[in-house]
Amino acid sequence: MSSKATWKVSAAVMASRVLGLIRDQIFAAMFGHSILMDCFNLAFRIPNLLRDLFAEGALSQAFVTTFSKKVETSGPDSAWPLGTKMLTLMSVAMSLICLLGILFSPQLVHLLTAMDGSRTGQWAFSAEDLALTVTMTRIMWPFMLLVSLAALVMGMLNARKVFGMPALSSCFFNLGSITVGAGLGLWLDPQMGPRTMIGFSIGVLVGGLGQLGCQLPALHRLGFRWKLNWQWNDPEVKRIFGLMGPAVISASVVQFNVVINSQFATSVGPGAVSALSYAFRLMQLPIGVFGVAVATVTLPALSRAAVNGLGGDFRTVLARGLRQVTFLVLPCALGLCFLAEPIVSVIYERGKFGLDARLVTAAALRGYGVGLLAYSWLKVLQPAFYAADRRWVPMGVSFLSIATSVALNWYFVVVQHRGVEALALTTSLMAVMNFGILYVAMRKISLGLDTAAFAKMGGKLLLAGGAMSGVCYAANVWIFHDLSGMAQISRLIGLGGTISVAALVYFAAARLLRVEEATEAVGIFTRKLRR
């Protein structure tokens, strides 16, 4: 597994996530955490949820695993027919699913608002709100078709060790959704009412088309030519769908928890759904930049290593991926927990996003931050079970996690009457529990994962993280004690300075403690400067 490739993917995903934050900043300034924003987030959550489960989750993992092994054993040219079959099949299957989704959108929206506050007399979606949500859901359903095809193209490129453009593809989605969505939305309704949201919904489709189209030239240069191939009765196609079934269930833990959170959030009050969405976007930034980047490079390497059995190569690749994620994501988790309010303030607090929105979003962000490292570990660990042909293990763990999630959400919200921070914390606890069980299982399957070295590095990084946390705590006391009284530019400079000093302290401490990953990071950066 190439560290250079990991850093290249990280840079590309960072660009995508930054554009995603800009998109959310536009939403926050225009709509705050209002009921209109809740409607859009609920509408987008339905196709986006299935995208995470099928397109960029189970389908991507299963396809990359099978396609990579095909390339390793028979050569790249022999793998292209498998790609054409899957593209043809998914075009038909996802089109049918989109049609069904459009037809049954009212029922799906009702499912997401099943815990509506009208049952407790607190708050409820109006009939107009529900109608708007249904309309936007129907507009955005074809996004799932586009992103499913984009995931298959990305899988073929990654299997051929092409990582740059696939990682940048999300940038094209964000650019399309921002420019077209905002432009068309304001043209439809300059007063930023419900029709503006219709424009943003159409922008999502344009962004999905861009995410697919930007990758096709790179695939064409590799020699791939897509012709309709209806020969679906193929052993490899069956293998992909055999892997997808358990993968859908195991990957559904976090996504199912998101649905449950949405249901309970509708009973917390107006803006709760949006606050969770804003916080989840911030939490996804380090996961996407580091966790997904490491997983993107690791999965093809694991699949190739598994061809020769679960020996030393397989264990080395997986253990190295987990260590890289730990080194990169731990400071991000600490930063989100200690600097939640200034981060939310700098990124979102403008226009209609005020003090109340900042406080509730920061509370949710701290809850998500607790499980950030576990989330990122799972991005690397879960696909390893499919590469090792042990797909039923994460599926079994998922059932336990889902049951626990429902119980905890019910206890915190209905019994204890807690807010969005409890919903976010529940999601984090599920990720921690899921990772712990899967790590023990993989350690037995692969006959060891260098746990002693992993623990030793973890201890060193906790010391480095402690030093970094001291910097963040001092900043809260001396710089961010009165955020409401600070000018926006002062908040930005203060946060930028704090993050820079905290990162420097963390990297310096890790280097002094002789953490291998810190030395590699410095080496890569130094070589870039020399060039």
Image (spheres, rainbow, N blue to C red):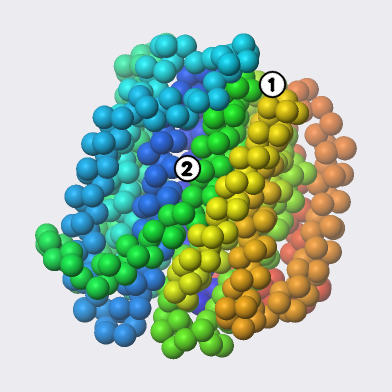
Q: Earlier in the sequence, mark 1 or mark 2?
A: 2
**Which secondary structure lies at badge 1?**
helix
**Which secondary structure lies at badge 2?**
helix
In this rendered view, identify the residue nearer to me: 302 or 94. 94
Q: Tell me the crowding category of disc 2: few under 14, some 14 to 19, or many 20 or more residues within 10 angstroms, Cα based.
A: some
Tell me where residue 386 appears, x and y as whole percent. 45, 69
Tell me where residue 522 appears, x and y as whole percent. 66, 71
Image vertical order of residue 327 relative to residue 344, above or below: below
Marks 1, 2: nearer the viewer: 1
Left or right side of 478 for 206? left
In this rendered view, identify the residue nearer to me: 377 or 345. 377
Residue that mark 1 sits on: 356
Image quarter for residue 3? Answer: bottom right
Q: Tell me the crowding category of disc 1: few under 14, some 14 to 19, or many 20 or more residues within 10 angstroms, Cα based.
A: few
The three-letter code of the residue at mark 1 reads Asp
Image vertical order of residue 57 relative to residue 297, above or below: above
Left or right side of 403 for 235? left
Which residue is located at x 51 percent, y 43 percent?
256
Residue that mark 2 sits on: 19
Which residue is located at x 44 percent, y 88 percent?
308
Residue 193, visible in the rendered structure: no
Which residue is located at x 39 percent, y 47 percent?
51
Tell me where residue 266 appears, x and y as whole percent. 56, 24
Image quarter for residue 465? Answer: bottom right
Which residue is located at x 31 percent, y 69 percent?
239
Total labels drawn: 2
Left or right side of 243 for 265? right
Image vertical order of residue 110 relative to residue 232, above or below: above
Tell me where residue 337 appears, x and y as whole percent. 74, 44
Left or right side of 258 for 508? right
